[in-house]
Image (spheres, coloured by chain):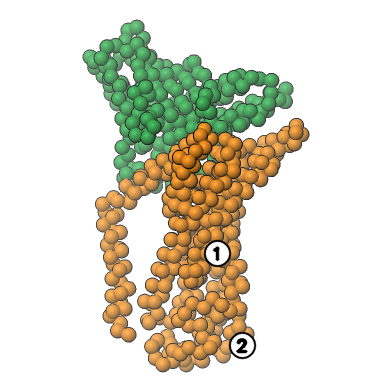
Chain colours: A green, B orange
Amino acid sequence: MKRVSSLKRACWRAALAACVWGAFPLAAAAHPHGWVDISVEGVFDAQGRLTALNQHWRMDPLYSQVLMEDIQREAGAASLEARLDALGVEIRDNLARQHNLTQMRLEGRDVAQAPVTEMTTRYRDRRLVFRFTLPLAAPLSLAGRTFRYQVFDPTYYIEMLHEANEQGTEPLPSALQLRGAPKGCTTTIIEASPDPKKVAEAAMLDRTQQGEPDLGRFFTETGEISCPG
Amino acid sequence: MPRVSVKTAFWGPLFVLIALGAVGYVSGWHHQVMVRIVVWQGRLYHALVDAISALERAPDVTAWSALLGVSFGYGVFHAAGPGHGKIVLSTYLASQGGAWRRALGLSAMASLLQGLTAVLLIAVLVFGLGWLTREAMGSVEHAELASFLMVTLVGVWLCWRSVIRLRRALAGSDTAITERDRSISSMSAPSSFSPPAFGSMVFAPSTPAHRHSPQCGCGHEHHIGPDTARDWRVALLTVLSIGVRPCSGAVLLLGAAALLDQFGRGVIAVFAMSLGTALTVTALALLSVVARDWVSRHMRPTRHRRPWAAWISLAGGALILALGLSLTHAKWQSASNEAPPMLGSPDAGPRSEHAGGLMGGG
């Protein structure tokens, strides 16, 4: 009984940390102290409507190790896989409170999301990989329109960018793919181009009001899916 | 000495600096710089973690040089950002006096100590006490609080010392000085003049009254004398107050190294990082010494040097005290605020449980 509760607590702790990257309180400066390499897959239904975004998050090596150390320290009967799953549940619950760090828009209007489904957590090549499906509240026809999404940590403690080439200069084509999309749909990943003045303003404003400035939105990439009308 | 040239030499460069600053400000140049710095810091962090994990996969020359290079660069660059250590050190040097050699020594010592603290912190907590690496890295919080408290102490000490000096200097202008006064502080040297000579120095600095007697400390930096021992104690406390807070980059590097079973290599990289930090901090320290010397050289003809130096010293002490107090206060607040929701810093409960569990199981 005690073992179970201590495992639970460890998971809760680890997952909370995963969510806010609060494990290293070195965040005195407003620059990222961890990163996640993301890839996204837009899923379409038989009618050619966008129904969900499959997301694939690869935690950075250091953070992956930190979480693994936590999990492995909690020696118990549960297999590694079961413990990873428990961690995944906690991560999911924490993300749910922050819109899964995902913002979706269609022609400038917010697109509502449904609760996350099909979540898995795995440890591969010394990286913790968290994969989940984020359904849209209702299927969305993209005919003649452009759908945009951003995945970011508002506090910019974690930098979340699409999987990129070795030099980190270009996002890989595999970082944004479509499944079952109507013919002619295209995808683009747009690099962030922060307006220095706005960043400075946000930094000043937030610092006086609540401590850490929320700079994440300025440094995030935008994924675009456009379909012919 | 012709007054006009002194004024030009003082105000000329100052105007150029102010003009450059104004142009930069109007054109939004400082915003650009800020954004660049945020981006670069993120990239450096990325490169650092990549380098240490690359070394684990293939410890060849390329991986080594990448790790040492990035660590050194991180040290140089990260030290260039705003940090209380640099403010404390340069304020101390600018206001308390000190030759370039002392500036060099103090800044190098502070930088290396920051690296050493990080090594000791991780080594003792993770390998000695069996803490989780995450918890050990989180304990930087406590080291920070200790550092801020020590900064406050340095401020109090400096203020107190300056006040004593000022009182002596002021008292010395209308009372005869005693042998004791002279022996206690070389900085209170103006009191070694008789009152009329003191007065003439204030209003006509280049009169023959300005002579160097054996007891006279005026006009030059004197760092030998009965005051030196106490002086070095403050200097040491200053270095400690900075050094007790481990370099965050070093903690990060060592945490990653410990998790990847590369701790020894991590320590080597931390020394490369400390060298980089020392380079930047030393440059800043020397700059503050040069600036102070420049100002005092140009101010000397128009003002009496000694009370001036003591006032500067008091102002510097007050600045460090204010910094220490505000940092301590901010740390205190953030620690009590973020504990439950963020769970950033491991609280005492689970930590001791972990340590106990390990010992019981082992």
Q: Residue at x 41, y 64 (%)?
A: B287
Q: Position of residue B279 (x, y in %)?
A: 46, 57
Which percent across, then down, holds residue B132? Answer: 63, 37
What numbered label is drawn on residue B192?
A: none
Q: Vertically, is B55 above or below A72?
A: below
Q: Is residue B16 left or right of residue A156?
A: left
Residue B163 vs residue B54, the one in the foreground: B54
Task: Please name which of the two marks, 2 or 1, marks the residue nearer to the observer.
Answer: 2
Q: Is residue B119 above or below residue A75?
A: below
- Residue farthest to the top, as pictured: A46
Figure quadrant of residue A50 = top left
SS under mark 1:
helix
Residue neighbourhood size for the residue with mark 1, other residues' Cα within 10 Å, grouped as few (<14), some (14–19), many (≥20): many
Amino acid type, residue under disc 1 in the picture: Gly
- Point 56% across, 43% down: residue: B265
Looking at the picture, how far across and down is residue B246, in whole percent?
56, 50
Q: Secondary structure at mark 2?
A: helix
Label 2: chain letter: B
- The answer as to whether the residues below labels 2 and 1 share one chain is yes
Quarter holding residue A66: top right
Residue underneath mark 2: B179
Q: Position of residue B54 (x, y in %)?
A: 49, 35
Most foreground residue, A28 or B357:
B357
Asked if A229 appears above or below B162 in the picture, the reply is: above
In this rendering, position of residue A47 left or right of residue B219: left
Q: Chain of mark 1?
A: B
Q: Which mark is residue B155?
A: 1
Residue at the right extreme, as displayed: B360
